Image (cartoon, rainbow, N blue to C red):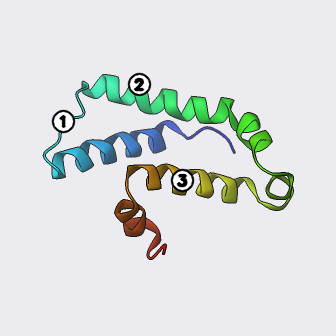
Amino acid sequence: MAELSTEDRQRIWRGLMRYASNRSESIGLTKADLQAAVNATDTWINTNQASFNSALPSAAQNAMTPEHKTLMFVAVAMARISIPFLRKIFGEVD
């Protein structure tokens, strides 16, 4: 999967600012620093796709599409935030 467009990266940036604002949390970065962090994250994901794919069991490497692998990665990352947060996105996970 290719890196996100500038417009999509800005959507994420705005979403993170809105999320923090709605929770009365401070991310602790300037807007420019947060945008740079979003850009760096997207670039890191793109750069490390092959490494992630190699870490998967061969059955998953061969059967899952890039979209499935990304969705799984995101689900695991969201679960690390909290299972209730994961439920808000995926629905019931128990």
Horizontal and vertical percent for residue 13? Answer: 36, 39
Report the Cα–Cα distance between label 3 and label 1: 24 Å
| Labels 2 and 3: the sequence-earlier one | 2
Q: Residue at x 31, y 44 (%)?
A: 16
Query: Quadrant of residue 31 in the image?
Result: top left
Q: Residue furthest left?
A: 24
Horizontal and vertical percent for residue 18? Answer: 24, 48
The residue wearing badge 1 is 26
Give the camera-side residue of 45 and 76.
76
Q: Residue furthest front?
A: 94
The residue wearing badge 2 is 36
Horizontal and vertical percent for residue 62? Answer: 86, 56
The residue wearing badge 3 is 76
Horizontal and vertical percent for residue 28? Answer: 22, 27
Q: Within 10 angstroms of label 1, few (less than 14), some, or many (20 or more) residues?
A: few
Task: Return the mark for residue 77.
Answer: none
Q: Secondary structure at mark 1?
A: loop
Q: Are marks 2 and 1 in contact (CB under 8 Å)?
A: no
In the rendered view, tell whether residue 10 sits above or below residue 65: above
